[in-house]
């Protein structure tokens, strides 16, 4: 079967780093961030791979994802709560 990599809309590079990387613990695998232009990047956390785009029309705000069979979810939840994200 194919691998699905959802594209999510992002509005600010700094906010993406703060939320996805610093709080949720994703890694930036690669990014396309030209000067004075919209960015596009791939993030991953274990087997979860997301694409984030600031390009108008790439994705709609308010989309949802479901992650099934997240091993260690309760421990991950405790890590996030301990970080006390605003």
Image: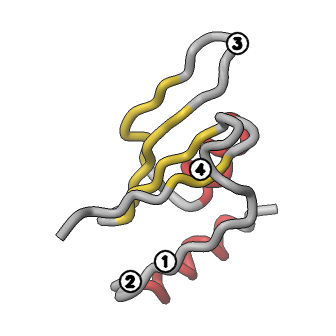
- Toward the front, the furthest residue is 57
Looking at the image, residue 74 sits to the left or right of residue 86; the answer is left
Residue 17 coordinates in the image, percent (x, y): 62, 42
Q: Which residue is mark 4?
A: 22
Percent x, y of residue 4 = 35, 63
Q: Residues within 10 Å of mark 3 (few under 14, many from 20)?
A: few
Could you say which quadrant of the image residue 47 lies in?
bottom left
Residue to which mark 3 is pinned: 36
Q: Are marks 2 and 3 in contact (CB under 8 Å)?
A: no
Q: Which secondary structure, mark 2?
A: loop
- Left or right: 77 as drawn, with respect to 18: left
Q: Give the mark nearer the N terminus: 3 vs 4.
A: 4
Q: Quadrant of the N terminus?
A: bottom left
Marks 1 and 3, how far apart at CA: 36 Å
Q: Which residue is mark 2?
A: 70
The color scheme shown is: secondary structure
Residue at point 38% right, 64% down?
Answer: 48
CA–CA distance between discs 4 and 1? 14 Å
Mark 4 nearby-residue class (10 Å; few <14, some 14–19, many ≥20): some
- Marking on residue 76: 1
Which element type, helix, strand or loop, lies under badge 3?
A: loop
- Pointer 1 with pointer 2, Cβ within 8 A: yes
Q: Element under label 1?
A: helix
Q: Nearer the viewer, residue 67 or 21?
A: 67
Distance from disc 1 to disc 2, alpha carbons, whole Å, reads 9 Å
Lower position in the chain sequence, tag 2 or tag 4 = 4
């Amino acid at each position: 079967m194919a691998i699905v990599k959802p594209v999510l809309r992002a509005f600010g590079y700094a906010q993406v780093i703060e939320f996805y990387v610093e709080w949720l613990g994703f890694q930036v695998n690669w990014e396309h961030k030209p000067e004075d232009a919209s960015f596009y990047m791939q993030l991953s956390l274990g087997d979860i791979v997301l694409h984030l785009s600031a390009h108008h029309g790439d994705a709609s705000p308010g989309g949802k994802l479901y992650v099934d069979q997240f091993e260690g979810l309760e421990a991950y939840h405790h890590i996030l709560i301990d970080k006390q994200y605003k």
